[in-house]
Amino acid sequence: MTPIPYILKYTQLPEKSIENTVALLNEDCTIPFISRYRKERTGNLDEVQISEIVKYKTQFEALEKRKLAIIKAVEEQGLLTSELKLKFSNATDLTSLEDLYLPFKKSKKTKAETARKNGLEPLAKIIMSQKSDEIEFIASSYLSDTIENEDDALEGARHIIAEWINERTDIRNQLRNQLERHALLTTKAIKTKKEDTSTAEKAQKFRDYFDWSEALNRCPSHRFLAIMRAEKEGFIRVKIELDDERALENIERRIIKSNNSCTAQIELAIADAYKRLLFPSLSNELLKNAKEKADTEAIQVFSKNLKQLLLGAPLGEKRILAIDPGFRTGCKVVCLDAQGDLKHNETIYPHAPQNKSTEAIKKLSSLVDAHKIEAIAIGNGTASRETEQLVKRIHFKNPIEVFVVSEAGASIYSASKIAREEFPNYDVTVRGAVSIGRRLADPLAELVKIDAKSIGVGQYQHDVDQNKLQTSLDTVVESCVNAVGVNINTASVPLLSYVSGIGPKLAENIVSFRNEHGPFSDRNTIKKVPRLGGKAFEQGAAFLRIKNGANPLDNSAVHPESYALVKQMAKDQKLPVSDLIGNGSVLKNIPLEEYCTDTVGLPTLEDITKELEKPGLDTREKAKAFTFNQNIKNITDLNEGQLLPGIVNNITNFGCFVDVGIKESGLIHVSNLADTFVKDVNDYVHLHQQIIVKVLSVDIPRKRIQLALHKN
C-alpha cells in the first residue's frame, strides 16, 4: 500500500509534493538535500515539512508491519476470515488495530478462559440474551466437579461476559473519550520516603506534588514529566481518577436491554469488566499517550534549544587563549592557532590555596604576546568569575576581547574516544581547555563531537523516550551542519559524518584520504575517496566547501550538477565565472526564465543567483563579549528589584533560565516575559542571548531565583 493518503490526512500538504518527496526518500535522498536541491519536485517544501512527511511515512510503515503480523497470527489460529482480514487492513491507527486484535491475543490464563473450560460459555450467552426470568434455575444445570453451586456457575459466566464487554470496541472508545475529557491526575506522597532523612533534601524538589490533583488534559508537559519522575524515584503514587458511576451508567445503557433476572448478572459483569479490565487497561493507555505527548513537546523544546546552540555566534578563525578555570588544581591554559590547533599548554595557580596571582598574570601576558593571541575564552565552571576578574586586570599590549564560554559537556568530550584520537598525548584537562577555546571559534564544529544529550539545554531529557530524542537531535545536528556547510579540508570526522549522504564511515575515509594525499583541490577529487559513490557525492558535494580551490564555485552552496548552468550564465554575460561571483548588479539583471528547463525552475535558479552574490556566506551572528555584574558572586548577593545582565542558557515551555554569573540559574516564567500572552518563549528570547533581568524573588533554602525580563 502507498503511504500517500495517510500522509495527506495528517499534513494537508499538496498530494504531488508528498508523492515526489516520498519517491526521493525511497531513493535514499536526505532531508537537507531534498529541501535545498529538489525544490521543483517537492513544490518548494522546507525541511520542517519534509520532516513531517518522513514522520508520517515511518508511522504508516510501522502500522502496515503490525497489520501483517496480526493477520499472520490470527491466520495461524485458524480464525482469519475475509471479513476480519478486511477489518484489520482498513484500520487507520494502531489503537483501533489493537482493539480489533484483542479477542485473538493469546494471553496468560484468564478467569474467562477457566470459565470456558468449565463449560460456562452457553450460560453466559443465555444471560446476554436477556430473555430468561429464571437464570438461577438454569445455572443449576451447569454444576460439575469444578462448579459446586449456582453462584460459582453465575460468577464464571460473568467472567466470560466481562471479557466480551472488554473486547467491544464501541465501549472501549466511549470510555477512552470519557477518560480523555474528564480524567483527573492525582498524586499522594509516600510517607516513608518523604520523612526519610537521607532523601529529605531530594524530596523537597517534588513537594509540590505530595498532594496534587488536576485534569490530565490540562496538565502541561513539563509538570507531567516532573510528576512521572517523582513517581519513578519513589516519592509519590500516581493515580488516574474518573467518575466511575457515570462510566458504568454509560456502559449499562449500551448493553442492558431488559429488566429480568439476567439484568442483575449483567450489571455485576459490567462492574467487574470496568474495574478489573477496562479501567486499568485504558487508564494505563491514557498515561502512556500523555507521556508520549509530553515527550514530543519536551523533545521539540530540546531540539529548538540545540539548534540555537549549534548555530550560536562563532568568533571565527582567531588565535585564542583558552582557560579551564579551577581553584586547588589550578587553571589549565592552552594556546590555539587560527585553525584551532594546540600550540602550547600549561597550568597556572592564581587562586586559593596557592594564590600565585602575580605569576599567573605575568604568564598570561607573555603567552598572549608570544602567540599573538586575539581573544581569550574562559570556561564558565568553578572559579570562572575569579579567573575572569584576574584576566581583566591585565594590561595587554593590544585590546583583547574576553569571553565566558559554556563548559556543558566539555568533560564528556575530554574523556571521549574522539578526544583521545585528537590528543593522544594529552590528559583530559588539556583536552577540556582546547574544547572551550574551539567552542568560541566555532560552536557548531566543536559541539558535534559531544552527545547532544550531554550539552544541557533540554527539558527532562533523561525522562523522555531516548530513541525518539536521539533521532530528533540527530536530525537537528544534520540540519545545522548542512545549513552552514563544511570546509572539507579542516573538518573533523564527527563534523563530516553529519554532512548529507556521508555518515561516520565515509567521514573517516575522507579524513584518511586527506591525510594521505593532502588537501582537496576541487570537488571532483572527492569522488576518489574510497567507497564514496555517485549517490553519496550527489547528496553531499554541495555541502562540502573547498576554500581557495581551482574552481570558485567549490566554495559555494551551488551544486556541481548546476555548474554547467552557471558557466552558461557567465558566458551569456561575457564574463568568466569568477567575475560573476559577488557581482550583484549583473546577477540581478540575468533573465532567469530563459534558463528554466524541465528539471530546473525558478526556485533553484533564484537560489543559485543568491548564492553567487554571497558565496559561502555564514549566516550566523558574530560572537560578542559579555560581562556579568562583578558584585554578584553567589545567591546571597541577590536582592529583590536588582537589575542584572544575564545570558539565556536554557529555554522551556514554561519560561527560560538565565545565567546571572552564579552557580544557580534564575527562571523567567512565561508570565514575566511580556505584558501579553506568550505562546512561544522563542518569540521573546533565544539561547545565549544577552539580556537584562530584574530579580523578583530569591528562595535561598530551595536555591530558586525568580526573574523578569527587563523591558528597556
Image (spheres, helix red, strand yellow):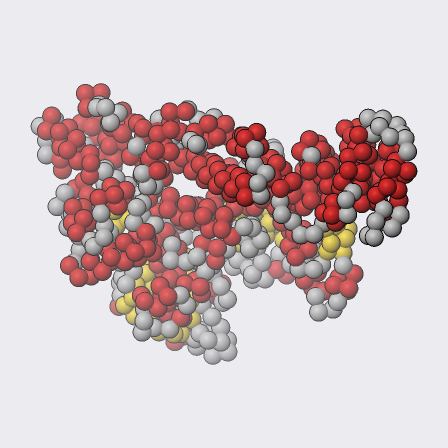
- Quadrant housing residue 414: bottom left
Q: Residue 540: image x %, image y %?
A: 27, 44
Residue at (80%, 33%) from the top-left corner?
126
Say if residue 501 shows up in the picture: yes
Taking the view exactly as shown, the residue that stands out farthest to the bottom is 354
Place of residue 577 in the rendered image (x, y in percent of width and height, measured from the top left): 13, 35
**Image: 80 above or below 419:** above
Q: Residue at x 41, y 24 (%)?
A: 14
Q: Nearer the viewer, residue 72 or 627?
A: 72
Q: Considering only vertical position in the picture, is 131 above or below 495?
A: above
Q: Position of residue 88 (x, y in %)?
A: 55, 34
Quarter where residue 15 is shown:
top left
Q: Is residue 441 visible?
A: no
31 sits left or right of 214 in the view: left
Q: Observer-nearest residue: 471 or 522? A: 471
Q: How many marks?
A: 0
